[in-house]
Amino acid sequence: MATPQDRPPAAVAVVTAVVGALVALVLGLLTFGVQATVHPREVPLAVAVGADAPPPLRAVADKLGAASTAEVVWRVTTPEEARGLLAAQDVYGVLELAPGGASIVLSGAVNPSGTQVAQQVLAGVAQGAGLRAEVVTVNPASAAGRTAPLAASALLWVAGLVAGAAFVRLVRRAAVWTRLLGALSAAVLGVGVVAGFFAVWDSSLPLGWDVLGYLGLVAAAFVLVQAALLRLLGLRAMAVLGPLYLMAPAVAGQVPELLDPVYRAVLWSWTPFRFSTEGLRALLQGGVVDGAQVWVFVGLAVVGLVVLLVPGKAGLGGEEAQPDLADGVVDVGVDEADRLPGAERQHAP
């Protein structure tokens, strides 16, 4: 059988170059490609005017409502309803019109990328209408508050991934309870690390049971899915789990209206990091948590747990399919060895 040393060096050089190019291609598509193709498409904004507003202001609001473009979609509403839409992240900014002037209302519960675009558009509209607008931010987020949701999602994923891979590498056979113990321990410790960072980065960030409970749910879902894939595929699962981490900052860090339609459909639509990032942002900044941001992780945790609890050997390289002995020799036992060809001749008188 040919060994790697027997292969022609020229062929090895070409193959390794191709592998390097493919890795660069994947990384470029999953990370830099997302950022390089950012462009606003149907960014949701609202223009709010009171029921007793004078006709000129009502006319301005109606004109904006009819001026939706491929980049911006307007909703005409009241100030109270507009702030509710903002808290639910259904709009990224509100232009409130009043006889004394205009206000640009933003929220710390909205993804910073969406807030930035909304502020630029709303400021331009107010200036074009000859209105002097002041910026009002509801539940303003500090630098740590803007960073924490995405950072927490990525750190919880990494904590479980490293722990799971190390467990598979070091333990060849494992009972169900040991897998669960390792996964849940990684989840608990990961939440502790994230909570500690929150306290260090900004002591004003809330760390109540709602935030800690949500972090625990996300961490449990992550580690159980990782443990399930590692059981089925062994260390080969890292080829799937590793690139998923690379997508977190590029995809979950943007609102969908800024992503290229291809990236939005192929990556953003299903990545769990977007649910955890926006759900945690809502909890930290006084927003509204969507039901999907909870049930997605309940479903992931259940699926991962079921795979771990299914009896039988792991497939495709899982740790249970590996030999017990360090040198790869399979112990066939004394009885089996006695029945091997030649064994009878050795024992014959």
Image (spheres, rainbow, N blue to C red):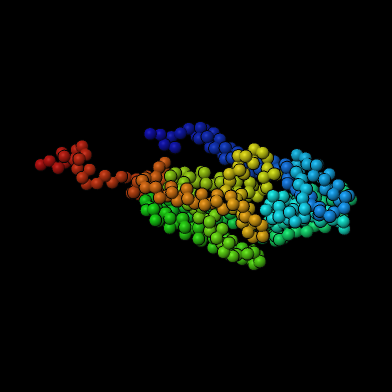
Please say whether residue 116 is visible from this viewpoint: no
Residue toward you, 112 or 166: 112
> What residue appears at the point 64 percent right and 60 percent down from the top-left corner?
284
Camera-side residue of 336 and 229: 229
Instruction: Check the image and name the residue furthest to the left.
Output: 349
* Residue 61 screen position, x and y as percent: 82, 48
Residue under the point 61% across and 43% down: 269
* Residue at (67% x, 48% y) in the render: 254
Residue appearing at x 24%, y 46% in the figure:
333
Q: Is residue 128 placed above or below 341 in the rendered structure?
A: below
On-image quarter of the C terminus: top left
Where does residue 170 sit, x and y in percent of width and height? 41, 53
Please state if 231 lies on the left or on the right of 203 as rendered. left
Q: Which x, y percent locates residue 29? A: 62, 40
Camera-side residue of 221 and 15: 221
Q: Let me know if residue 152 appears in the view.
A: yes
